[in-house]
């Protein structure tokens, strides 16, 4: 290993350590995305450490050196694809938000991981993936490309799902998923073409840094429970919409769940959280890609749509009510979901600021709630 590539590996380790420590202090630890991302960072720190040890023992004579050289190289070959499998799981969950799907994907990923692990261990005797000279110097085996192919397949597997579902992924997160592969691909290509340099870890570090910046942006603009935009992002969006250069009318809808407190009191806050997540699922199924959805308050959600006529706005409200009724009839939950709403068609000729607009739909929503309580 040259001094330059040694320095790049150490630098990559330090950057990953900083990302890991920062993630522990900033991110919501109970969520699947947090666990997958931190596992990916930790595994790559372990891989860098193992890779550095392979270079330390390489070419050194003696039984201890030979044992550790073989052990570290075997571990490296076994663990490398696991990092890419974690990337598969991370991107899969970011797209679909489905724990059951994640379990199915894990079982599928076990097939190439087990195959790679078996061939890596067998290579200690056969030299298929790697071997050693009499001077204890590592060299690639005749079947090294099989290991490389497994890694490439795991790296590229998420792409069909990413592009197929690109309209359901926020643009910034879509970009981070696409960009993830570029640094690691460049680093791995350099390492394959120019034996003796180690730029894979620099590439992976840059890839994880891109993802982490996206996560931080997501954390600052997204409600952690429902994963729609939060109130802070909502305020920015409404102000920009009202002051926008594009002088088009738009519709704004404020939705407040009926009797949500009763759900919390009767079934507990965990079920209440589930009800909020179900509400978001219903709303998102009825919205278009460019519609804006945010959590306005505890059980309140706000929608901004490029709907320009009262008739279309009324039709949207009716469609939402029908979807809530369908949910209650088909999903078999211990609670029923319904809502009161305030909605308004904004026209730029009104010269209304963002604060007054939000106050207006809030008043309209409470009037609707009062009418519902009377009926």
Image: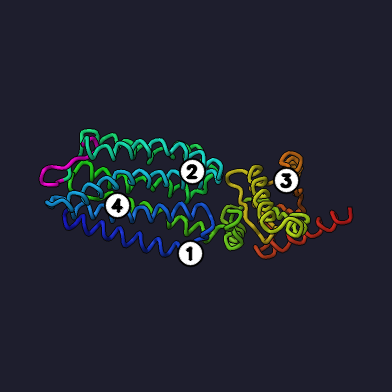
Q: 131 or 255: nearer the eye?
A: 131
Looking at the image, which residue is at 43% across and 50% down?
Answer: 176
The Cα–Cα distance between marks 1 and 4, rounded to whole angstroms, is 24 Å
**Does residue 176 appear to the left or right of 313 in the view shown?**
left
Looking at the rendering, the stretch of residues picked out in magenta corresponds to 127-137
Give coordinates of residue 317: x percent, y percent. Answer: 74, 46
Residue identifier under label 4: 201
- Badge number at residue 92: 2
Q: 18 or 172: nearer the eye?
A: 18
| Secondary element at image label 4 | helix
Residue identifier under label 3: 333
Looking at the image, which residue is at 73% across and 39% down?
Answer: 330
Residue identifier under label 1: 26
Q: 3 or 249: nearer the eye?
A: 3
Looking at the image, which residue is at 22% across and 37% down?
Answer: 125
| Secondary element at image label 1 | helix
């Amino acid at each position: 290993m040259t001094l330059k590539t040694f320095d790049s590996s150490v630098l990559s380790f330090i950057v990953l350590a900083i990302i890991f420590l920062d993630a522990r202090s900033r991110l919501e630890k109970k969520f699947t995305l947090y666990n997958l991302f931190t596992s990916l960072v930790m595994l790559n720190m372990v891989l860098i450490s193992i890779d550095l040890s392979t270079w330390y023992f390489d070419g050194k004579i003696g039984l201890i050196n030979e044992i550790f050289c073989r052990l570290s190289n075997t571990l490296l070959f076994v663990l490398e694809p696991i990092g890419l499998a974690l990337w598969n799981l991370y991107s899969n969950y970011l797209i679909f938000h489905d724990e059951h799907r994640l379990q199915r994907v894990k079982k599928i990923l076990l097939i190439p991981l087990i195959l790679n692990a078996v061939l890596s261990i067998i290579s200690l005797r056969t030299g298929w993936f790697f071997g050693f000279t009499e001077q204890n110097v590592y060299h690639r085996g005749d079947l090294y490309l099989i290991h490389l192919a497994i890694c490439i397949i795991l790296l590229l597997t998420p792409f069909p799902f990413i592009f197929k579902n690109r309209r359901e992924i926020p643009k910034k997160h879509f970009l981070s998923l696409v960009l993830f592969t570029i640094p690691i691909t460049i680093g791995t290509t350099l390492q394959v073409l120019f034996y003796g340099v180690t730029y894979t870890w620099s590439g992976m570090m840059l890839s994880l840094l891109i993802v982490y910046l996206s996560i931080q942006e997501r954390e600052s603009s997204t409600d952690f429970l429902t994963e729609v935009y939060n109130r802070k992002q909502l305020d920015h969006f409404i102000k920009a919409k009202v002051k926008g250069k594009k002088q088009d009318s738009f519709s704004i809808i404020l939705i407040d769940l009926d009797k949500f407190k009763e759900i919390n009191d009767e079934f507990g806050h965990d079920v209440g959280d589930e009800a909020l997540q179900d509400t978001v699922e219903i709303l998102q199924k009825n919205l278009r890609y460019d519609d804006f959805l945010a959590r306005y308050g505890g059980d309140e959600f706000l929608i901004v749509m490029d709907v320009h006529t009262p008739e279309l706005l009324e039709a949207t409200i009716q469609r939402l009510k029908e979807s809530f009724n369908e949910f209650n009839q088909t999903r078999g939950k211990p609670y029923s979901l319904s809502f009161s709403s305030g909605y308004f068609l904004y026209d730029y000729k009104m010269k209304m600021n963002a604060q007054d607009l939000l106050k207006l739909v809030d008043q309209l929503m409470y009037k609707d709630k009062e009418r519902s309580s009377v009926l």
